[in-house]
Image (spheres, helix red, strand yellow):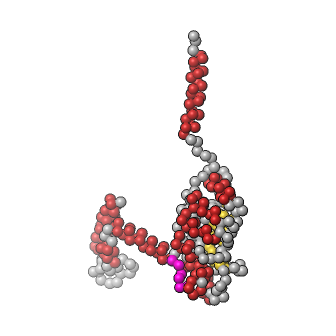
Amino acid sequence: MPMAASMALRRGRHLLSLLRACPRYSSRSSGRTPGLLKGRILPYLYNRFYDMEAFIEFGAKLRSWNLERKNKFYIQIREKYGDNMAAAAFALMLKGGVRFCGQTEWYREHDRKQFCVDLVDYQGVPLEAIDFSGSIINYDGLGSLVNLKALRHLDLSRCPNVDDWSLSRLHVFGDTLEELSLAGCPQVTERGLGCLHHLENLRRLDVSDLPAVPNKGLVRILLEEMLPQCEVVGIHYDNELALPIEPDARQGQAEEPQGAARVQKAREVPA
């Protein structure tokens, strides 16, 4: 890492010297230069982020702050309109979708203006379904749903920040949740799937394309034993169902024919 940073630093110095020598990007050149490179922007960035490691650390902190900001609960909306409206606004902010009880149409991210118009009409109506697929929701963001009393459908597919700890928050929906999708969540493992035994009313579970789950065939069997009333989709019985042979067992199987061969050779030796 230090070597890569020093190389990048030397390249940055070389690039900066070339840009300063070029009249097009020089701050002392006459006339206006279009684009972000005119003036002293590049020298400022170079002097501000002279250490490449500091620049990388700053980018990581910025992404973390943005993730935390978007996963914060809408406290003001909750205090004014209740838990269901706050959760709906949060889902739409993450470009998801919501559906209220008694409705067939979904509110999507492009319907946020219409949702604000219909806000009063749905006040007091329970939230029935939420679609967070492909969003950046994480453990903290799921905290905005824990007070929903009528949630039946939850889609968390392709959410890169949903992990085993996130699934541990779903136990509050044990009496209501009927459909759950975890398809394509890269951080979900078999340990997180074990937390779903609280969802006694679950009728359909999508666990397809979970790269962190080994022995998928065995995991399907365990899920069906844990949730006998639920339809498990996305994993088949023959997916990595074969058990590995123990080293001792393989060694014993290899030594047995060798021992038989030695006995056969002893019998063939003349007296």
Give the total of numbered labels: 0
Which quadrant does the C terminus fall into?
A: top right
Instruction: Give the residues in magenta.
Output: 72-77
Residue at the far top: name it: 271
Percent across and percent down for residue 257 are 59, 28
Quadrant of residue 208 in the image? bottom right
Q: Is residue 151 magenta?
A: no
Percent across and percent down for residue 198 are 64, 65
Percent across and percent down for residue 163 are 54, 64
Residue drawn at 59 percent across, 16 percent down: 268
Q: Residue 136: in sight, yes or no?
A: no
Q: Nearer the viewer, residue 103 or 40?
A: 103
Quadrant of residue 192 in the image? bottom right
Percent across and percent down for residue 162 are 55, 67
The answer to whether 180 appears left or right of 27 in the picture is right
Q: Nearer the viewer, residue 157 or 223?
A: 223
